[in-house]
Image (spheres, coloured by chain):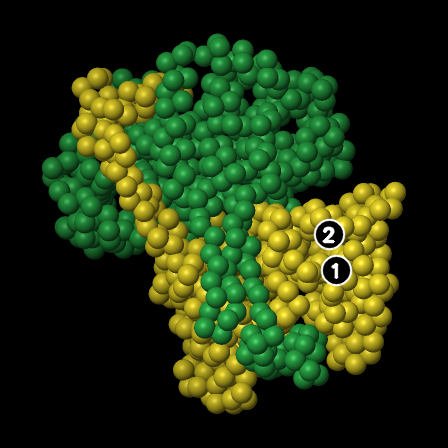
Chain colours: A yellow, B green
Amino acid sequence: MPVRLDRQSADFEQRFRDFLAAKREVSADVERATRAIVDDVAARGDAALLEATKKFDRLDIEAAGLRITAAEIDAAVAACDPKTVEALRFARDRIETFHRRQLPKDERFTDAAGVELGWRWSAVDAVGLYVPGGTAAYPSSVLMNAVPAKVAGVPRVVMVVPAPDGKLNPLVLAAAHLGGVSEIYRVGGAQAVAALAYGTATIAPVAKIVGPGNAYVAAAKRLVFGKVGIDMIAGPSEVLVIADDTGNADWIAADLLAQAEHDVSAQSILITDSARLAADVERAVEAQLATLPRAEIARTSWNDFGAVIKVAKLDDAVELANAIAAEHLEIMTADAEGLSNKVRNAGAIFLGAHTPEAIGDYVGGSNHVLPTARSARFSSGLGVLDFMKRTSILRCGPDQLRALGPAAMTLGQAEGLDAHSRSVGLRLNLS
Amino acid sequence: MPVRLDRQSADFEQRFRDFLAAKREVSADVERATRAIVDDVAARGDAALLEATKKFDRLDIEAAGLRITAAEIDAAVAACDPKTVEALRFARDRIETFHRRQLPKDERFTDAAGVELGWRWSAVDAVGLYVPGGTAAYPSSVLMNAVPAKVAGVPRVVMVVPAPDGKLNPLVLAAAHLGGVSEIYRVGGAQAVAALAYGTATIAPVAKIVGPGNAYVAAAKRLVFGKVGIDMIAGPSEVLVIADDTGNADWIAADLLAQAEHDVSAQSILITDSARLAADVERAVEAQLATLPRAEIARTSWNDFGAVIKVAKLDDAVELANAIAAEHLEIMTADAEGLSNKVRNAGAIFLGAHTPEAIGDYVGGSNHVLPTARSARFSSGLGVLDFMKRTSILRCGPDQLRALGPAAMTLGQAEGLDAHSRSVGLRLNLS
């Protein structure tokens, strides 16, 4: 059974706090093992990478076999269902169109004192994209990571994907091809992350690593953070649906299950001011579970982490939504737009009854890599800015230095940094 | 002696690679001790925080004494040299003006299919600002962290600063006051970071923690990353000066020393096509060291990590600058602007002979919190965006869902996520 909470009940505050604080993932102690793998690849390069690949993926190859060839990629694309490839292409185009609008503008201005100021954006030189193998190999995620990097102007996008027992998902290769990935290597796990960060004879290092992975991949990304940039550490996924009595119980149930089927630690939450709808949705969830292929996963997620929260009025739902800071927020109320404007913390908002989250997962155009586990309080979904960096620019002439210099000298002296002060004073004949 | 490299010499590539790879900081193994402190504060709150404060800062206070009162702040401001407070105010105003231009615009558009798309930026609810105690307590850094947060619209900016033996730097409190900090607590170290992340009875938790600190603070920020957002992990600072024969050796030497005086692990590098200038700068550094209060620190940094690199032509300097990815890049050449346009990797660029880095440190208006230790390859200086997050927005009506839905269903099925497909199909009467 999902948790049932009532905003009006006396113990709500405490129960809601406990609900928010509940951990959905067991963090296995993988750091020690991960560090050994990362250090080994950093020290021994390809040799360590190949040994780990043999051990973990049961794939015994030479360094020359690490890179997936153009012929293999062509063969994979040819082997895919053309309708699916067409859908990927449709998604790629929409993702590209959306993300082009995120390209930032450079800035340059001269202030009243005559000082020239501004900044310039530039793409990261090389990005590594981690793609999980096995069941979590989602071609849509390849597009969501690769396309913004290409839009940003990253010249070199390197993909790593494990090939357990030599097997690769052709759709993942097709998505990489469509997404403009420049190089693909059949390696995974912490060893692949280490290879991207430190480089080996075969894989040149990158400056930033993005993409989801298992606990070892996440731990490896934490370890190499600083040496290279990383994106967020992805946690279990969640959806929050806010609905009023106008909501369609079947549609809402389907959306809650679309989240729950991802993973046993996924979370689906309904907040509503309608007791009738709450009951109908719970019934519809049960009915739909009966015919869902991934029913076992979805049921475990729903029973362990699902929640139905009853509120007296929809404004209370806003307050709770800001505390939950959901990755995905669907709003199906009479005034969805008005309600959404009061929400500060959410990765993505899906407005109205005809915008199921699955549209955003695949073909809406916005990014489906979004902040999980309450991190929408402080972070954003993946975007073009994640593949760029800003260099600030400052220029003074003699007059401007005369105007600004004395205050800088005062502060340098106050901080005990005399060479700072002197670097200004020498130019002004003041020291 | 600083390293001397010549781009023309046979062993340059290898020596430059070694130079780039050299570690400038010994990373003490502080993680275990830090985890114990963080876990203790997370579990026991104020009691653990007060015990750690007594132990590490030799400050024995009650919970009620943690917060610095308005009267204490007023007294601190009154005790400061008015000229310094005026310089801080001048800096604050310029930082605010510069950062206002970084406020991002929301986006909303309707595409050809009629789908409404866009995003909305919002401020982080609460930010914690770590400020080191002792010699590294820089009031300018308080402004550089607090002002962008306030410009972003963060309603609650909490500062923590250790008070070893009860002592606080009045200028740090004055800067906090000028910067719009809402609460200040006299705690530091890993315990302060943990208090900000997990909250205690006295200190409400924040959503993001920024600001520099020692190895324990950096380790604590790494540990709480995910629970809250963090800024970059600051490493030792560096300056790269690119100059041609027109460069003023005394001014360049002063700038190299302004970097070197920060810390023994700071790094100052000169790249020039003029052997004459290189020799003059080295001589000027020695001459200026003779009268520098922090000569011992600056000399150690210069001797251990300084470098003078001779190139045949300035274009070679660009290539090396992109590999070095310096935090600060000063360009003093005949065509500084033209050269700067070829630089991709730098935290901040200072153009021309009259823009010493110290201007950017204090009063230029741009942020002095910049990516160190080659991280300008993948990250940017602190700015307004670091205190905001982007929520993406998507809305389909029935027609749009009909247009986009089938491709989403195809991809959901291809990824084995039938509930995703069904959430679309139910709305289209297709499942």
The answer to whether the residue labelled 2 contacts the one labelled 1, judged by CB atoms less than 8 Å apart, is yes
Which image quarter: residue B283?
Answer: top left
In this orientation, which residue lies closer to the viewer: B257 or B128? B128
SS for callout 1: loop
Q: Position of residue A84 (x, y in %)?
A: 54, 84
Mark 2–mark 1 Cα distance, whole angstroms, equals 8 Å
Amino acid type, residue under disc 1 in the picture: Asp
Chain at numbered mark 2: A
How many badges with numbers are in the image? 2
What residue is shown at x 62% (from left), y 48% (from top)?
A342
Looking at the image, residue A385 sits to the left or right of residue B421; the answer is: left
Which image quarter: residue B220?
Answer: top right
What residue is shown at x 57% (from left), y 35% (from top)?
B155
What residue is shown at x 44% (from left), y 63% (from top)?
A99
Q: Position of residue B264 (x, y in %)?
A: 39, 31
The residue sitting at the right extreme is: A10
Kindly tell me whether residue A42 is visible in this rendering.
no
Q: Position of residue A249 (x, y in %)?
A: 77, 69
Looking at the image, residue B360 sits to the left or right of residue A340; the answer is: left
Q: Which residue lies under the disc numbered 2? A: A314
Is residue B211 shown above or below A312? above
Chain at numbered mark 1: A
What residue is shown at x 81% (from left), y 72% (from top)?
A284
Q: Which residue lies under the disc numbered 1? A: A244
Amino acid type, residue under disc 2 in the picture: Leu
